[in-house]
Image (cartoon, grey):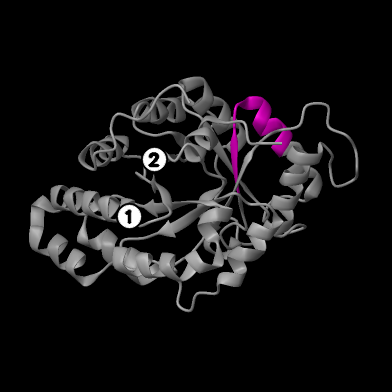
């Protein structure tokens, strides 16, 4: 059975897609989710709804899905194996589809030690590949892992994460997820377009771009401090020295210079053969995402898919 969402249709049609991100708040009020989503309408094709990022407690991603869908954007629900056993993953997949999610990103989850509940117990009943296999089975065979039939199977586009600029990079880790049934790869943040193009060249003979759509992560650059933090502390993220130097030289104009640098990165990514889109993580700054989309010539987004 084929995936049933708008993002899947756009990717299959060869559209260079733009996705965004909504982080549910540490709150029982969904107004912030609604407001951020509304600011992204017309600029993105789908929005990732995060699942307890940085291993810190937030509103449930399924609740976030409900608010994002109601605001008018197709949700991609993130589900971590860290916090769920197979029973919970199964029920959340059913619930997320019912609430409007049409894509799922299966993740391991950030280490509990970095979050606000370091003494919590990680579940990890299923690996990411196992979770993808479960979601594929539900979609394509209409059954759960127990063999129980599903009356109305969810038809998710099945996504996984990858870190293409990790050093060292092991392609086998991604291929295990592809073998499990993933048909979308969303990457770690990438600013080094030359290194990313080299990764794509290495993966092309392995059939990556025939097996899955690849969307590359980008956080709009706003300050030299943020750029250095990502370069020094985020695994697999490289911020090339010319970018850091340009942000430092910009002084008070760093946010505007960063906007131009981000647009250049997005345009460079767009030129890499096989890459299907960019995932813009605005960190709550939807206006910056909109300006990047416009500046990169990716506005307006297609309608009617």
Q: Whole-percent x and y of residue 16?
A: 39, 42
Question: What's the magenta region?
Answer: 93-105
Closer-to-camera residue (273/129): 273
The image's mark for residue 245 is none
* Residue at far bottom of view: 168
Closer-to-camera residue (206/74): 206
Q: Is residue 105 visible?
A: yes
Q: Is residue 128 above or below residue 92?
A: below
The numbered mark, 1 or 2, whose residue comes first in the sequence reads 2
For residue 193, what is the image quadrant? Answer: bottom left
Write the residue at 68% across / 59% down.
179
Q: Measure the C-alpha gap from mark 1 to mark 2.
A: 12 Å
* Mark 1 neighbour density, 10 Å: few (under 14) some (14–19) many (20 or more): many
The image's mark for residue 18 is 2
**Residue 150 magenta:** no
**Residue 103 magenta:** yes
Q: Is residue 192 above or below residue 305?
A: below
Residue beneath label 1, please? Answer: 269
């Amino acid at each position: 059975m084929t995936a049933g969402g708008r993002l899947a249709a756009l990717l299959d049609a060869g559209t260079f897609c733009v996705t965004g991100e909504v982080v549910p708040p540490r709150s029982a009020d969904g107004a912030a989710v609604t407001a951020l989503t509304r600011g992204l309408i017309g600029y993105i094709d789908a929005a990732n709804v995060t699942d307890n990022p940085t291993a810190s407690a937030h509103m449930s991603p399924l609740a976030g899905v409900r608010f994002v869908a109601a605001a008018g954007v197709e949700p991609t629900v993130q589900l971590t194996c860290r916090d769920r056993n197979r029973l919970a993953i199964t029920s959340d997949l059913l619930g997320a589809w019912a609430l409007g999610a049409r894509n799922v990103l299966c993740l391991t989850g950030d280490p509990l030690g970095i979050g606000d509940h370091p003494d919590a117990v990680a579940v990890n009943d299923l690996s990411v590949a196992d979770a993808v296999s479960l979601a594929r089975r539900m979609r394509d065979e209409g059954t759960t892992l127990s063999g129980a039939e599903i009356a109305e199977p969810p038809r998710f586009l099945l996504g996984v994460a990858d870190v293409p600029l990790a050093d060292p990079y092991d392609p086998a880790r991604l291929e295990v997820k592809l073998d499990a049934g993933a048909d979308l790869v969303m990457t770690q943040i990438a600013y080094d377009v030359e290194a990313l193009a080299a990764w794509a060249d290495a993966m092309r003979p392995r059939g990556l771009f025939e097996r899955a759509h690849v969307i590359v992560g980008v956080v709009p650059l706003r300050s030299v401090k943020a750029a250095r933090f990502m370069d020094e502390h985020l695994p697999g993220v490289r911020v090339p020295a010319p970018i850091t130097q340009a942000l430092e030289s910009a002084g008070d104009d760093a946010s505007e210079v960063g906007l131009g640098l981000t647009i250049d990165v997005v345009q460079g990514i767009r030129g890499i053969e096989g890459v299907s889109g960019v995932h813009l993580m605005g960190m709550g700054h939807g206006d910056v995402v909109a300006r990047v989309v416009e500046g990169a010539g990716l506005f307006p987004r297609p309608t009617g898919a």
